[in-house]
Image (spheres, rainbow, N blue to C red):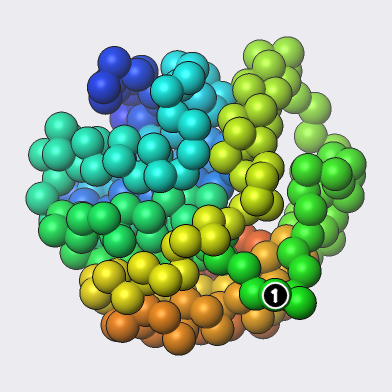
Amino acid sequence: MTPTESTATINGLKFRLLRGGRGTPVLFLHGANGFPGWLPLFERLSADHDVIVPEHPGFGASDDAPGLVNVSDFAFYYLDFLEQMNLPEVHVIGHSLGGWISAEIAIRDRSRLASLTLLAPAGVRIKGVPTGDNFIWTPDEAARLVVYDQALAEQAIARVLTSEEQDQMIRTRLMAARLGWEPRWFNPHLEKWLHRVRTRTLVLWGRQDNLLPAAYASVWQDKLPNVVCEIIDECGHSPHIEQLEQVVTQLKNFL
């Protein structure tokens, strides 16, 4: 199906929004690389769900967000989003930074969450298990290191951005740096509150993730009270792209 693209406003901040399908709502919160567009995953889920994909404030074509300075602010922002969009029972799926935001939402107020799916989420740290540093990777290195399938990397490297897309990517990277620069992609206080995430949770992680190693799945496995955790082979940092069929099967069974 063709999704509806619109501009919405929450707390005075305008942002891009894609929405398509019918059924119980699914909210997808994207990662630090920016607005994903309408992915094949969304198309598949839209057969049974109302799929809602916002672009985070401060990213890409959305409004600047000087008042949102950390992931905690984004958690409160999306709690307002759920309330103002009248979403009383929503399945939240978050990838990477979006997974971190999702967890921060859930430790604060889980009353509107039907379930939580975390795709290689940022937000925690294991001492002695280094993460990749995407802030120092060149664009070509980033393209190659975030995927297992190097054909996908070649496609990303070969893609030529328009001047508008280049401007949006710069804004996205600046906002990502605001949220993930120091400390690198985690909140030292998040882990101790994960017991509050009593919402049933699915964690999916690529075994060959070079940015956030699959070993980090153990923290979520140990700390979340109601969790199913799966490690996916031949997969980098984006399971929902590299191993679509496995992720769709997992999600449909879970949702």
Q: For numbered disc 1, what is the local secondary structure? A: loop
Image side of residue 99 versus residue 82, left or right: right
Residue depicted at 22% across the width and 36% down the height: 80
Q: Tell me if I can see residue 253 in this picture.
A: no
Residue 14 or 42: which is nearer the viewer? 14
Classify the position of the C terminus by image quarter. Answer: bottom left
Residue 179 or 214: which is nearer the viewer? 179
Residue depicted at 62% across the width and 45% down the height: 180
Q: In the picture shown, does residue 238 fall above or below 252? A: above
Q: Tell me if I can see residue 104 in this picture.
A: yes
- Residue 152 at x, y percent in the picture: 76, 55
- Residue 223 at x, y percent in the picture: 41, 80
Residue 169 or 185: which is nearer the viewer? 185
Q: In the picture shown, does residue 254 fall above or below 190? A: below
- Residue 244 at x, y percent in the picture: 54, 66
- Name the residue that disc number 1 marks: 127
The three-letter code of the residue at mark 1 reads Lys
Q: In the picture shown, does residue 81 fall above or below 192? A: above
- Residue 245 at x, y percent in the picture: 51, 71
Quadrant position of residue 52:
top left
Residue 218 or 184: which is nearer the viewer? 184
Image side of residue 136 versus residue 48, left or right: right
Classify the position of the N terminus by image quarter. Answer: top left
Quadrant position of residue 182:
top right
- Density class for disc 1 (Cα within 10 Å; few <14, some 14-19, many ≥20) is few
Total number of numbered discs in the rendering? 1
Image side of residue 214 versus residue 135, left or right: left
Residue depicted at 37% across the width and 71% down the height: 194
Residue depicted at 68% across the width and 52% down the height: 184
